Image: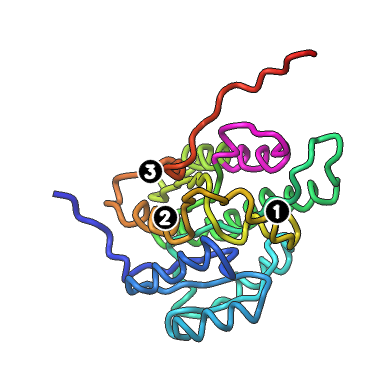
Amino acid sequence: MYQLLDPSRFVVFITGATSGFGEAAARRYVAAGGKVIATGRRKDRLEKLQAELGADNCYIIELDVQDRAAMEKAIAEIPAPFDAINIVLANAGLALGLQPAAEAVLDDWETMISTNISGLVYTVRLLLPGLIARGGGHVVTLGSVAGEYAYPGGSVYGATKAFVKQFALNLRSDLQGKNVRVTNIEPGLTETEFSLVRFKGDEGKASAPYSRTKAMNAEDIAESIFWSTTLPAHVNINKIELMATTQAIGPFDIFREG
């Protein structure tokens, strides 16, 4: 019979914890008795989350994952007992715009690359040595079905999530024998602030993808993250691809003249 891991012993470092998946995951781990280091750019939201979860359970860091020097400093200064990190949830990421590639804003592309790729690799690289030194742990990356399947307007966002997928797989190879598991979470249609960020505050555009359908929510994804990390230590879930029941993979896009 499986011996599940004890979540009350988890110390979880979470990027992008001010909303969506990261915020929901922080609540899920603390509810199970774990501790979290919640990081993000919006200090007011971090303080609200800490007040909700309790300072003994939630340590907060105002942090932009794109800033490597700030990441290095913040990680080096995490106090005990929060410094005994054994789960890294590299969640921070975003999409900006939905224009065709020839019309896309280059600044948006650069921001997606800096956050979804550079910010993720900074997070993982800076925290991995500690996981290994403490005898093991779990790295959870946040990909997307966009890293598996193409869609119009998703050129660079989808490419960044394809990077996340391959990075996670390569980590698995690099970490053989280190007792560190790696899981890539690939959500589909999920109603969070994701679209509001993508469309830069335009609520009409942001709500359109969820109109007349039943999307997943942040708690659904947090539960999948939690489940993957609580399995027995000898079991590694390479990836979890989730889609709302109301979402499916569409037909091939075929251009026809005339």
Res. 237 mark: 3
Locate the C terminus by quadrant. Answer: top right
Q: Nearer the viewer, mark 2 or mark 3?
A: 2
Q: Disc 2 or disc 1, which is closer to the eye?
A: 1
Q: Quadrant of residue 241?
A: top left
Q: Residue at x 40, y 56 (%)?
A: 136
Residue sticking out furthest to the left: 1
Picture residue at 85% right of the left edge, 46% below the top: 105
- Indicate which disc, 2 or 1, sits on the residue closer to the N terminus: 1
**Rendering coords of residue 85 (x, y %):** 46, 67
Q: Is residue 35 magenta?
A: no
As drawn, the label of residue 225 is: 2
Helix, strand or loop for disc 1: helix
N-term-proximal mark, 1 vs 3: 1
Q: Can you tell which of label 1 and label 3 is closer to the viewer?
A: 1
Magenta stretch contains residue 161: yes
Q: Amino acid at mark 3?
A: Ile
Q: Which residue is mark 1?
A: 205
| Residue 45 locus on image (x, y percent) | 61, 78
Outermost residue on the top side: it is 257
Secondary element type, mark 2:
helix
Amino acid on which disc 1 is placed: Lys
Q: CA distance from mark 1 to mark 3?
A: 35 Å
Label drawn at residue 100? none
Q: Position of residue 174 (x, y in %)?
A: 50, 40
Mark 2 → mark 3, Cα distance in angstroms? 10 Å
